[in-house]
Amino acid sequence: MTLLEFKQIFDLYYHPIKNFLYYKCGDIDQAEDLTQDVFMKLWDKREEINIETVKSYLYTIASNMLLNKIRHDKVVMNFADRNRDHFNEQSPQYALEEKEFKKQLEDTIGAMPEKQREVFLMNRIDELTYKEIADRLELSVKAVEKRMHGALGYLREKVQHKI
């Protein structure tokens, strides 16, 4: 794979891969970091890549990297739980109410069930219609509506603010 081919692949797939990871993990910063890692790995393996299957290869790398990150985070959390007394825990103080709300909203979206989060973000971030989401996820429009209804109900319950 040449540098030009890599750039074309990067330009074509960066945002879809980032969105895919964001829908799965619910953390935009983590999704961007992982997306960069995906393309670094692609560059490292550029001599072995078949251009015709690069899309599925990218999504496979992305899924594997996310699973590895989740496993790593779980180990870190278990360690922190076991050694809680050794850490000085301080809760951050937010200066602005808006910043607090944004954090609460991001956390709530991150904790939302994956299927609901995926549909919610595809609609609100990518601005896809229910029909477009249904086509991409190979679901019925009714199933998308049900997931969106569940996502909005979840947000209302957890955030206690109209969305």
Image: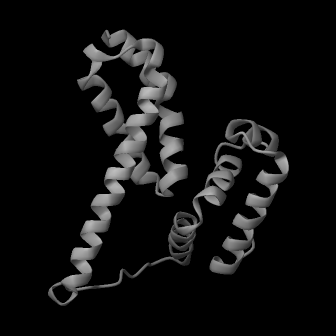
Q: Residue furthest right?
A: 142
Q: Nearer the viewer, residue 95 or 146?
A: 146
Q: Position of residue 81 (x, y in %)?
A: 26, 82
In the rendered image, the quadrant that contains the C terminus is bottom right
Q: Nearer the viewer, residue 96 or 161?
A: 161
Q: Position of residue 103 (x, y in %)?
A: 50, 70
Q: How is the image coloured?
A: one colour
Q: Residue furthest left?
A: 86
**Which residue is at 42% across, 24% downward?**
10
In the image, residue 19 above or below residue 116: above
**Which residue is at 37% across, 36% downward?**
61
Question: In this rendering, would 156 be left or right of 130?
Answer: left
Q: Position of residue 2 (x, y in %)?
A: 31, 9
In the image, residue 97 above or below residue 147: below
Q: Position of residue 106 (x, y in %)?
A: 53, 65
Number of marks in picture: 0
Question: In this rendering, would 108 be left or right of 5?
Answer: right
Q: Quadrant of residue 7?
A: top left
**Which residue is at 71% across, 44% downward?**
127
Question: In this rendering, would 69 be left or right of 136?
Answer: left
In the image, residue 32 above or below residue 5: below
Q: Is residue 8 shown to the viewer in this render?
A: yes
**Which residue is at 51% across, 76% downward?**
100
In the rendered image, the quadrant that contains the N terminus is top left
Q: Is residue 163 shown to the viewer in this render?
A: no
